[in-house]
Amino acid sequence: MTQTTKTQVGIIGGGPSGLLLSQLLHLQGIETVVLERQSRKYVLARVRAGVLEHGFANLMREARCSERMEKEGEIHHGFYIYDQQAGKQRVDLHKYSGDNSVIVYGQTELTRDLYEAREKMGGIVIHNAEDVKPHDLTSVSPFLTYRKGEDVHRIDCDFIIGADGFHGVSRKSIPKDILKEYEKLYPFGWLGVLSRTKPVSPELIYARTERGFALCSMRSQVLSRYYIQVPLSDTEEGWSDDAFWDELKQRIPADDAARLITGPSIEKSIAPLRSFVAEPMRYGNLFLAGDAAHIVPPTGARGLNSAASDIYYLYSALVEHYKKGSSKGLENYSARALARVWKAQRFSWWMTMLLHRFPEMPGYDRRLQDIELAYLFSSDAAMSALAENYTGLPF
Ligand code: FAD
Ligand code: DHB
């Protein structure tokens, strides 16, 4: 038998996008139900973003979820770019972005904070929801169905939000003749390692070498996060911890390599690099947000930050709808969100093309990469463009 309930906004996906929207709406008295396919433990075991822009942090504040982020997050005013030929140069974010900065605070921690806030306020987040399906999207009464064990459930909604990541069901529910997809695949992935060691550098290092790209990042002063560019054919199992540390040392400046503290990996995973945008981000009463609608290669640290602007636009539009009876924000949502999404796409593509080693790259293209970097290191205007994008364009 199908059990039917009702809510105002049904949200598919209990990742950062879905949880943040649910929390923000709840504070405005708007009811939501979040359906998440995985268990909470599974969601919290995924190690992903580490760098947040202030726009994201402000939304966490507005959602009353910022207490731990303010205490444990680290404000970074700059980072390094290392090139084997040109050396190591600091990008002074503060100077070049007009006093802006970023916050280093892990997606895992932020998601935990959002789950706890939802729990405290009695928010409904249903985990292990199987076979989630959105229905009647172009009608005024769309609904969601899902299975939990033997039981089938139905939730009647005013609106459905697809915040279910790249592999979710929401985007696939939009007819193919309406949805246009743009995609670029890169011929490599990032192998990431998390280790309980002191980070090698107080600020992040993005490294460009003949052997490929590397990134030294962190989650705290006792938790390091490192990445190296690897071929798509590589597997996590094929990389022992020793092999990872040896390779990393060969891709970072010699003095940093000499200082690098290694230890057992507590997480190791490979992420393929992809650029992707689906247009439009609205179909009837279904609204896509975050990775469900767009993906960037992680190089520019834009993915979660792009999700944040979607959530901000959606949140404002839904509040406008319920509180002021205006549907203008909802009508403009897709165009407004996509305008910022494409800027994040451009920046992520640029940083990825600048810093990675492409297999069989023609000499001409490699020289252009050299010159792009030389220009960046010599031009205040180029540094400002980098800093403005990295710290986050305005919502
Ligand atoms: P997701 O986090 O993918 O959440 C979607 C949720 O929906 C998941 O919990 C999933 O289980 C659930 N779901 C899927 N299908 C269904 C279904 N059918 N039914 C119900 N639920 C479903 N971004 C940054 O801004 N800064 C960074 O420094 C950064 N670093 C990154 C490093 C790496 C290695 C990677 C891989 C990504 C990084 N990102 C970064 C990107 C960032 O992690 C993503 O953009 C972010 O997770 C998007 O959040 P989301 O909630 O939209 O999607
Ligand atoms: C991290 C990931 C990124 O893609 C990035 O640009 C910076 C930091 C991280 O996981 O720490």
Image (spheres, grey):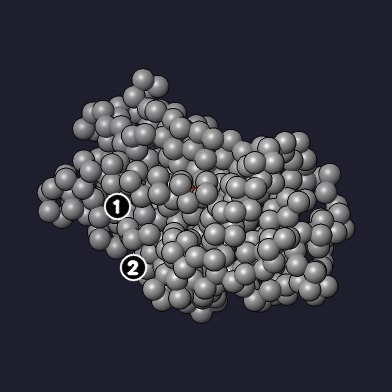
Please tell me which residue is depicted at 63% across the width and 53% down the height of the picture. 370
Of callouts 1 and 2, the N-terminal one: 2
Q: Residues within 10 Å of mark 1 (few under 14, many from 20)?
A: some
**Residue farthest toward the left in the current orientation of the protein:** 325
The secondary structure type at the circle numbered 1 is helix
Counting from the top left corner in percent of width and height, residue 337 is at: 33, 47
**Residue at 73% over, 60% down:** 84
> For the view shown, which residue lies furthest in the bottom direction?
71
Q: Give the quadrant of the N terminus.
A: top left
317 in relation to 199, above or below: above
Mark 1, mark 2: which one is toward the viewer?
1
* Kind of residue sitting beneath label 2: Glu
Image x and y of residue 239, in percent: 83, 49
Report the side of 237 relative to 324 (left or right): right
Determine whether label 1 and label 2 are within 8 Å by CB.
no
User: Which label is found at residue 62?
Assistant: 2
Residue 164 in view in this figure: no
Residue 284 lies, in percent from the top left, at: 27, 32
Label 2: state its secondary structure: helix
Q: Is residue 75 shown left or right of residue 80? A: left
**Measured from the top left, where is residue 391 in percent x and y?**
45, 65
> Which residue has dot 1 on it?
313
- Residue closest to the eye, 177 or 81: 81
